[in-house]
Image (cartoon, helix red, strand yellow):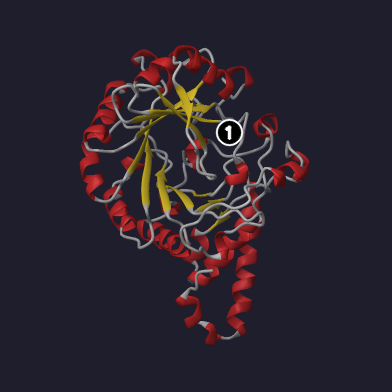
C-alpha cells in the first residue's frame, strides 16, 4: 500500500477532526444517493458464483496502489476518465435526445484547479492513466493548460482524450506538446450524408482531417470509435476495416448501449459475434491478440494491414471482472460504474474545505460499494441513468 505523507502529517490534529470528517463523508453519500442506488444482486444477470468464477486470479500491477482504489472484489482502479464539459458541438442521436439535455450551470462544473487537484490525488494513489472526455473536451478553453498540468503529474503514464474530432486538427499539434499521448476519435460513418443525419450537424470532412492529422503527428495507434447500429452503419463495417490497411489506425466497433434519451432498442444492436462474422467472411487472415486482463476491447490483427480492429462488447459479453475504471463527471460527481446510477460528489466537499484525507475516504467508500457486475442489457435499458453527454464518453 502506498503511504500518503499528507495523511501522516495530520495525525496530531486529534479525534475531533476525525469525527467531523466522518460526519461530513456520511452526508455526502446521502446526497449522492439522490441519483439512485447501485444495482442489487437481484438485478445482476449472472449469479455471484459466476462473477467470482470469471474474476482474474490476479491483475498484473506495475506499482503498489492505495487501498482507496481497490474494491471489495480485489479490482484495482488505475484508470480515471474525467469529463471536462457537458457541452458539445454535435448532437449525436445515441448520445442525447433531439430536444437536447439540461446542462449543469457553469458555476457547478469543476474548475481547472479542482480537476488538477483531484487528478493529482488519484495519480498519487496509483492511477496511471487518465482519459479526458465530454461533451466535447476540445472545446474547453483551458484544455491546453489542463493537459500540460496533468501530463506533468509524477506517476501518470498515459494522458488520453476521446473527441469527436470536429475542431481537433488545428488544436492537436499544441495538445501533443502539452503531453496528450493517446487519442480516440469518434466516427460512426464514412458517408457524409449519414454523418449529418446521425450528428444533426455537418463536419464529416473535418473529422477525417483530424484522423489524418493525428497519424501524421505520430499517434500510433490512432483509435477510431464506431458505434454500430443496425440499419444505419452495419453495412460499413468492412469499409471501416479498410481504414486500417495502410495506416496505424485501430478501429473500435462498439455495441450500441442504452442511456437516457437515446431510444435504445435491442433490434438496433449488432452483436460482437455478428460483427466478427461479417469481418471474418471478408478477411481470412484475422487473428485475436492476447489482451491485458483490464482491456475493454477484444483486439484483432488483420493480415496485411498496418492497423488493428477491436470490438467493445459491453452488451453481449461484458468485461466487468477486469474493470479498472472510475469516472469523474464534469459536475464533480464520482461514478464507479458506467451503467450504475449511484454517484457521489467530490466537488461539494472540496468547496466546503475537505482535505485530501477526507476526499480519500469518500472515494474509497464509493469504490468499495462497486458491484461485481452490471445488470443484463434489458435491465440496464430500464434502469434510470444519465444521458451519455452528462456521464462523459
The x, y position of residue 331, in whole percent, is 48, 50
The x, y position of residue 376, in whole percent, is 69, 33
User: How many callouts does the rendering have?
Assistant: 1
- In-image side of 252 versus 41 (left or right): left
| Residue 384: quarter of image | top right
Could you tell me if residue 274 is visible in this image?
yes
- In-image side of 3 versus 378 (left or right): left
The x, y position of residue 85, in whole percent, is 41, 44
- In-image side of 158 versus 289 (left or right): left
**Pointer 1 local density, CA inside 10 Å: few below 14, some 14–19, many at least 20:** many
Residue at 61 percent of width and 66 percent of height = 25
96 and 53: which is toward the camera: 53
Asked if residue 385 is positioned above or below residue 326 in the image, the reply reads above
| Residue 340: quarter of image | top right
Label 1: element kind:
loop
| Residue 263: quarter of image | top right
Name the residue that disc number 1 marks. 314
Residue at 50 percent of width and 68 percent of height = 352
Could you tell me if residue 195 is visible in this image?
no
Asked if residue 63 is positioned above or below residue 330 in the image, the reply reads below
The x, y position of residue 234, in whole percent, is 49, 15
Asked if residue 120 is positioned above or below residue 143 in the image, the reply reads below
Residue at 48 percent of width and 70 percent of height = 356
**Quadrant of the rendering where the N terminus is positioned:** bottom right
17 and 109: which is toward the camera: 17
327 and 35: which is toward the camera: 327
Residue at 64 percent of width and 71 percent of height = 23
308 and 374: which is toward the camera: 308
Amino acid at each position: 500500500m502506498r503511504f500518503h505523507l499528507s495523511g501522516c502529517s495530520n495525525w496530531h490534529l486529534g479525534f475531533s477532526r476525525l469525527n467531523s470528517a466522518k460526519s461530513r463523508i456520511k452526508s455526502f453519500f446521502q446526497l449522492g444517493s439522490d441519483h439512485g442506488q447501485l444495482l442489487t444482486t437481484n438485478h445482476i444477470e449472472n449469479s455471484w458464483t459466476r462473477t467470482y468464477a470469471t474474476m482474474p486470479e490476479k491483475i498484473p500491477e506495475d506499482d503498489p496502489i492505495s487501498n482507496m482504489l481497490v474494491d471489495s472484489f480485489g479490482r484495482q482502479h488505475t484508470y480515471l476518465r474525467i469529463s471536462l464539459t457537458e457541452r458539445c458541438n454535435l448532437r449525436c442521436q445515441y448520445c442525447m435526445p433531439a430536444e437536447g439535455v439540461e446542462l449543469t450551470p457553469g458555476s457547478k462544473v469543476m474548475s481547472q484547479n479542482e480537476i488538477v487537484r483531484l487528478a493529482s490525488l488519484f495519480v498519487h494513489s496509483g492511477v496511471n492513466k487518465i482519459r479526458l472526455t465530454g461533451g466535447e473536451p476540445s472545446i474547453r478553453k483551458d484544455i491546453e493548460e489542463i493537459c500540460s498540468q496533468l501530463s506533468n503529474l509524477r506517476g501518470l503514464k498515459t494522458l488520453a482524450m476521446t473527441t469527436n474530432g470536429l475542431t481537433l486538427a488545428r488544436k492537436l499539434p499544441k495538445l501533443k506538446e502539452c503531453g496528450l499521448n493517446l487519442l480516440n476519435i469518434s466516427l460512426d460513418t464514412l458517408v457524409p450524408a449519414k454523418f449529418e443525419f446521425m450528428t444533426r450537424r455537418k463536419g464529416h470532412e473535418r473529422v477525417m482531417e483530424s484522423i489524418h492529422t493525428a497519424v501524421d503527428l505520430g499517434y500510433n495507434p490512432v483509435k477510431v470509435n464506431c458505434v454500430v447500429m443496425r440499419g444505419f452503419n452495419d453495412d460499413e463495417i468492412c469499409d471501416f476495416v479498410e481504414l486500417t490497411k495502410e495506416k496505424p489506425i485501430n478501429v473500435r466497433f462498439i455495441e450500441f448501449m442504452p442511456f437516457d434519451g437515446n431510444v435504445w432498442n435491442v433490434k438496433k444492436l449488432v452483436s460482437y459475434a455478428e460483427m466478427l462474422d461479417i469481418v471474418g467472411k471478408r478477411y481470412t487472415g484475422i487473428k485475436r491478440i492476447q489482451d491485458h486482463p483490464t482491456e475493454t476491447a477484444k483486439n484483432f490483427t488483420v493480415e496485411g494491414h498496418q492497423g488493428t480492429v477491436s470490438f467493445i462488447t459491453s452488451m453481449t459479453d461484458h468485461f466487468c471482472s477486469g474493470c479498472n475504471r472510475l469516472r469523474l463527471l464534469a459536475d464533480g460527481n464520482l461514478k464507479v460504474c458506467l451503467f450504475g446510477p449511484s454517484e457521489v460528489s467530490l466537488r461539494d466537499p472540496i468547496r466546503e474545505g475537505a482535505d485530501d484525507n477526507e476526499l480519500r475516504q469518500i472515494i474509497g467508500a464509493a469504490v468499495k460499494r462497486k458491484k461485481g457486475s452490471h445488470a443484463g442489457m434489458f435491465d440496464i435499458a430500464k434502469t434510470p441513468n444519465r444521458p451519455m453527454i452528462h456521464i462523459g464518453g
